[in-house]
Image (spheres, rainbow, N blue to C red):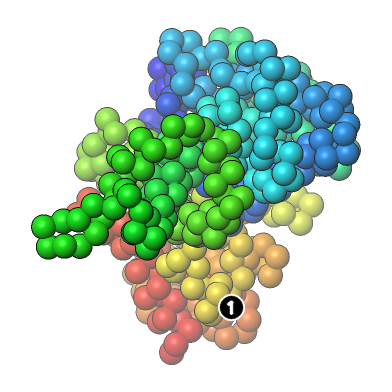
């Protein structure tokens, strides 16, 4: 049973921000440090900073000849069974450093040409150039290093969805970038059948098919060698019927009898421009997996039909306010992922005197949420959402409440989700006044807007809600 089933959330993978794992089986996805490094939401930036901190210190110790201290850091990279991600069959058992001869693997690392050269730049480069390091180990190493952030994320998601936490559970090792060492702690944790579980943001997992030695070798190294052999007129050059020269990749592969990761590194040292081209090309291709890739068994059409019926079935009023909140969380997730992520419910602000219904992190690299910040210069590191399950129109008090939530640091974009607005023209005029007074951009969305966007998504229009928001923005700031 998956997390959503165990805790009866009545949600699909499309409606939750985390990978909906089965705690008794490994899901064949991997925490991807390459993908993580390109994410711009605050959680991902902080997690990527932890990876760089560990990696930089580890390499520094090796460069200084402090191999014992480096091995001490390395030896804490045990099997991260808590995430239930990876390649294991049957019950999760991990494939981390601790599950094998850690000393042998450590020796392989410090003796590799890549490490000795001092030119290896990123953790993901281990997979390219160091024998014995594959996507599973890179994923496990990353999971260990960001365990503290994953723990925070798990706590937030459990509170969001009403999943109970167990108090005072021993957790660790956790990487401390200040002390540059591993620490242990006792924290509220998700425990299922006696096993500690960490939830993982679906935005940072992948199949690890972008940044691989195979792609680098086949798509960049061999193509470079093809051009070079043709340029030099080598013995490997053949000719097509029209006389044009070519060199087959099969021929080149057969000529490289000693191909290995160290051969690949030697080539990179001689031809850094090829590696630079590889990195630039892959940077354009990297992106978070869509929901269908994470759970291909789900029918998005059926999920959308269910969401529409569920939203319409919620009775306006305070008694169903929580149901409405959680329904909107799921709808925003399916409509705006991966551009917005990491939803947090009822976040306290101003020392607990006020609460924000929901806020999301802005992770957009294009589209509405990106242009709002980069072009219109409206700060929106977070998107603040207030849910009003009212049977009447929202008015000035609700607008004033949202104004009180918006700050430059928190964000100047607020979305009010409500059931309906009879006089939308009047409410937009109030939003326009608020914007002109520098109180922030406040955009209202009704059931009708959400349902329309869900139906458009079913047709394949994944950006419909962003278009609606953009139109509302124009109506407010361009008038």
Expressed as whole percent of the image width and height from the top left, the position of residue 48 reads 66, 46
Query: Residue 165's quadrant in the figure?
Result: top right
Q: Which residue is mark 1?
A: 377
Instruction: Using the image, determine if residue 221 lies above or below residue 168.
Output: below
Q: How many marks?
A: 1
Q: Residue furthest toward the front?
A: 235
Number of residues whose C-alpha sits closer than 10 Å to that of mark 1, classed few (under 14), some (14–19) or many (20 or more): few
Q: Position of residue 162 (x, y in %)?
A: 55, 31
The structure residue drawn at horizontal position 53% and vertical position 80%, both measured from the top left corner, is: 376
| Viewer-proximal residue among 453 and 274 | 274
Residue under the point 51% across and 14% down: 92
Q: Looking at the picture, how far across and down is residue 260, in whole percent?
A: 51, 32
Image-quadrant location for residue 81: top right
Q: What residue is drawn where x is 68% and y is 70%?
A: 408
Nearer the observer, 66 or 144: 66
Q: State whether residue 212 is above or below residue 1.
A: below
Outermost residue toward the bottom in this view: 479
Q: In the rendered image of this protein, does residue 69 appear above or below residue 325?
A: above
Q: Tell me the SS state at disc 1.
A: loop
166 displayed left or right of 139: right
On screen, residue 13 above or below 137: below
Residue 428 shows up from this direction: no
Position of the N terminus, as image quadrant, is top left
Is any atom of residue 71 visible in this view? yes
């Amino acid at each position: 049973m998956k997390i959503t089933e165990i805790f009866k959330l009545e949600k699909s993978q499309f409606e939750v921000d985390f990978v909906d794992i089965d705690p008794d089986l490994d899901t064949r996805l991997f925490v991807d440090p390459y993908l993580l490094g390109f994410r711009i939401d605050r959680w991902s930036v902080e997690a990527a900073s932890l990876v760089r901190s560990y990696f930089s210190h580890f390499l520094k110790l090796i460069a200084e000849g402090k191999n014992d201290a480096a091995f001490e850091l390395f030896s804490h990279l045990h099997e991260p069974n808590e995430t239930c991600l990876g390649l294991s069959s049957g019950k999760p058992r991990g494939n981390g450093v601790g599950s094998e001869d850690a000393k042998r693997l450590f020796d392989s690392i410090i003796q590799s040409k890549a490490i000795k050269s001092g030119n290896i730049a990123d953790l993901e480069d281990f997979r390219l150039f160091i024998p014995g390091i594959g996507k599973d180990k890179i994923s496990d190493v990353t999971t260990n290093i960001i365990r503290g952030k994953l723990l925070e994320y798990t706590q937030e998601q459990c509170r969001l969805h009403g999943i109970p936490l167990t108090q005072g559970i021993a957790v660790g090792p956790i990487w401390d970038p200040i002390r540059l060492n591993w620490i242990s702690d006792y924290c509220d944790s998700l425990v299922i059948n006696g096993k500690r579980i960490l939830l993982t943001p679906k935005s940072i997992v992948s199949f690890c098919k972008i940044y691989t030695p195979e792609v680098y070798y086949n798509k960049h190294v061999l193509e470079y060698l093809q051009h070079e052999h043709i340029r030099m007129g080598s013995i490997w050059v053949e000719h097509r019927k029209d006389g044009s020269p070519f060199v087959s990749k099969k021929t080149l592969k057969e000529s490289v009898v000693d191909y290995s990761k160290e051969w690949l590194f030697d080539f990179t040292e001689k031809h850094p421009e090829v590696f630079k081209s590889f990195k630039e090309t892959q940077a354009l291709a990297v992106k978070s997996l869509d929901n269908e890739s994470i759970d291909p068994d789900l029918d998005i059409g059926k999920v959308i039909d269910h969401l529409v019926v569920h939203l319409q079935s919620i009775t306006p009023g305070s008694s169903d306010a929580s149901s409405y909140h959680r329904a909107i969380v799921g709808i925003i997730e399916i409509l705006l992922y991966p551009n917005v992520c990491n939803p947090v419910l009822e976040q306290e602000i101003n020392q607990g005197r006020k609460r924000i219904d929901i806020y999301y992190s802005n992770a957009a690299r294009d589209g509405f949420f990106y242009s709002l910040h980069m072009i219109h210069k409206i700060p929106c590191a977070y998107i603040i959402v207030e849910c009003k399950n009212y049977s009447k129109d929202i008015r000035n008090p609700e607008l004033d409440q949202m104004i009180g939530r918006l700050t430059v640091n928190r964000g100047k974009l607020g979305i009010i989700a409500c059931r309906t607005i009879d006089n939308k023209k009047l409410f937009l005029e109030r939003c326009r006044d608020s914007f002109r007074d520098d109180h922030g951009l406040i955009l209202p969305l009704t059931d009708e807007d959400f349902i329309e966007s869900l139906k458009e998504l079913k047709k394949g229009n994944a950006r419909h809600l962003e278009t609606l928001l953009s139109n509302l923005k124009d109506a407010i700031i361009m008038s």
